[in-house]
Image: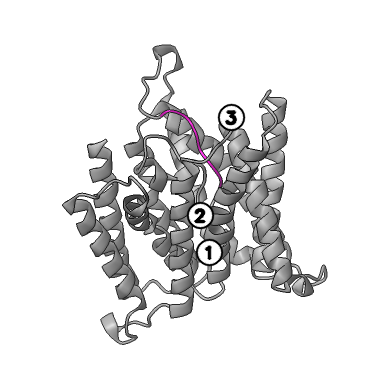
Amino acid sequence: MTQRVETDVLRDRPSEADPGRDGAHAGQPGEPVPAAAAPTAARMALAFGSIYFIWGSTYLAIRVAIETLPPFLMAAARFLIAGGLLYVWARRGAAARPSPAEWRAATIAGGLMLLGGNGGVVWAEQRVASGVTALLVASVPLWMVLVDWLRPSGRRPTASTMLGVLAGLGGVVLLVGPGELAGARRVDPLGAGVLMFASLCWSIGSVYARHGQRPGSAAMTTAMQMLAGGALLLIAGTVAGQWSAVHAATVSLRSLGALAYLIVLGSLVGYSAYVWLLGVTTPARVATYAYVNPVVAMVLGWLMANEPLTARTLLAAGVILSAVVLIVTRREGAR
């Protein structure tokens, strides 16, 4: 649990990463863009297309990757490889060597967001459809509001924001409620519970990341969080005994292809597009990915993985996404 906007709308500085998805972002959104640097419409369309469709498709890619790869070890490989490449790139770009204090902060943030957040997502996708997973992860702004409120010197949410939180939680209850509700099978309760825990970890990690010590380079910050989170995922997979499930003869090309997709497109291309967008347009516009990703994930899961698209799921999607829209737009207006 990519994965983002959840941190953007709750703080004055952009966040460092995304739960089920891809890594960090940086920049100073809201600063005027010099006329000479004004982006072209084609470049804007390509960048938005990347965060809309690539990030929306990562949930299906995760499901394919864990068909023959253990979930924690797959996620560890994803972030260690992507983080290693990004670290080398940042160092070649003259980024300073991180200090021990910066590594400590990156380890805490990476542990919460990538081990707790993304790790929960990849584990839960063994029990929950990829489209529904994306829908539940889209509720992260709901938890972010509560975490940001409860922290020391936190901001009290407005009445409309709390209405959005309650509506979003109601949508989650609709998904995991009694099986006969809305005439459709409910979502696996354990999988949904793990996804809620993952979303909470992601929210706490995002709030912590904005206060923790970090280097001046956004790319270096992201690389450090990926490397730290990937190392923790590797330890978790080892403790869980997942190495016994790794056999070269049983790993499919589909799973390896999905892993490569997550590394290259999900964690590097999507990340680059997001960083660039944060520097050339407003957070409110970039925030629209939070509404589009679950729709993309549900449609792809239905078309390519035969995941059911029931009336219950569609109703819950409408409730949760409406709540996210209410929270994000109200917070953006307040800023």
Number of numbered discs on residues: 3
- Give whichever of 58, 304 is nearer the camera: 58
Describe the element under mark 2 as helix, strand or loop.
loop
Q: Secondary structure at mark 1?
A: helix
**Region of the chain picked out in magenta, as a range:** 22-28
Occupied quadrant, residue 125: bottom right
Q: Work out whether mark 2 precedes mark 1 in sequence or the reverse, and give the earlier one.
A: 2
**Label for residue 217?**
3
Q: Can you give x and y, in whole percent of width and height, for residue 51 in the image?
A: 47, 44
Residue at 59% across / 59% down in the picture? 115
Side of 232 where 165 appears, left or right: left
Q: Is residue 25 magenta?
A: yes
Q: Is residue 261 visible?
A: no
Q: Looking at numbered disc 1 in the image, what kind of residue is underneath it?
A: Val
Q: Can you tell which mark lies on residue 121?
A: 1
Query: Which residue is located at x 51 percent, y 38 percent?
Result: 25
Where disc 3 sits, the SS reads: loop
Whether the residues at callouts 3 and 1 have beta carbons within 8 Å, the answer is: no
Q: Are marks 2 and 1 in contact (CB under 8 Å)?
A: yes
Query: Dot 3 surroundings within 10 Å: few (below 14), some, or many (20 or more)?
Result: some
